[in-house]
Amino acid sequence: MDTYLLACCRYIELNPVRAGMVDVPEKYKWSSYRNKIGIKNSDWMNFDPCYQGLGKTEKERAEGYKEWVQGSIPEGEWRLIRQSVQRGGN
C-alpha cells in the first residue's frame, strides 16, 4: 500500500476541517471523503488502488479509510506534503 498517496488524500480531506469550514470531514460535501466512507454513492467515482487495498469489501475499505483519515498523523507528515507541493511534486 502506498502510504504517501493515502497521506496526501488525508491532507486534502482534512483541509476543510483545518480551514474551519466544517468540524468533521464528512460534513464537507465537495470532497470524495463521503463516497470513500460510504455516506454517498457516486457511480462516476473511481477509487485508486491504495484505497482499494484498504479492504476486500466496500465496508472494509470505508471503515479503513475513515480510520486512516481520523487516525493520528505521524510527526512531519504534513510538512513533507507541503514541501512536495511547493516543489511541484518532485
Image (spheres, rainbow, N blue to C red):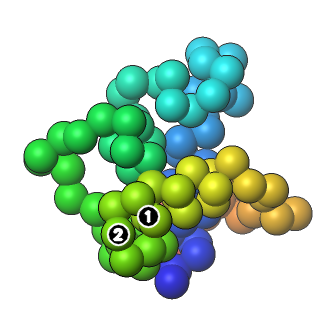
Q: Amino acid at mark 1?
A: Arg
Residue in the image at 61% along x and 18% along y:
22
- Element on which disc 2 rests: loop
Q: Is residue 37 above or below residue 14?
A: below
Picture quadrant where residue 72 is located = bottom right
Residue furthest to the right in view is 75
Reading the image, the residue beneath label 2 is 57
Does residue 16 appear left or right of residue 83 in this picture?
left
Q: Amino acid at mark 2?
A: Thr
Which residue does the image show at 51% across and 31% down from the upper left?
26
Instruction: Residue 10: give x, y in percent of width and height.
Output: 58, 52
The local secondary structure at tag 1 comes to helix
Residue 74 appears in the figure: yes
Q: Confirm or deny contact between disc 1 and disc 2 (CB under 8 A).
A: yes
Residue 80 image point, x, y percent: 72, 64
Say which of 87 and 13 sits in front. 13
Up the image or down, 53 lies above or below 18; here it is below
> Which residue sits furthest left?
44
**Residue 36 in the image, given as x and y percentages of width and height:** 39, 50
Where is residue 30, by image quadrant? top left
Q: Residues within 10 Å of mark 1 (few under 14, many from 20)?
A: many
Res. 77 mark: none
x and y, in percent, of residue 19 in the image:
66, 23
Query: Which residue is disc 1 drawn over?
Result: 61
Nearer mark to the viewer, of 1 and 2 = 2
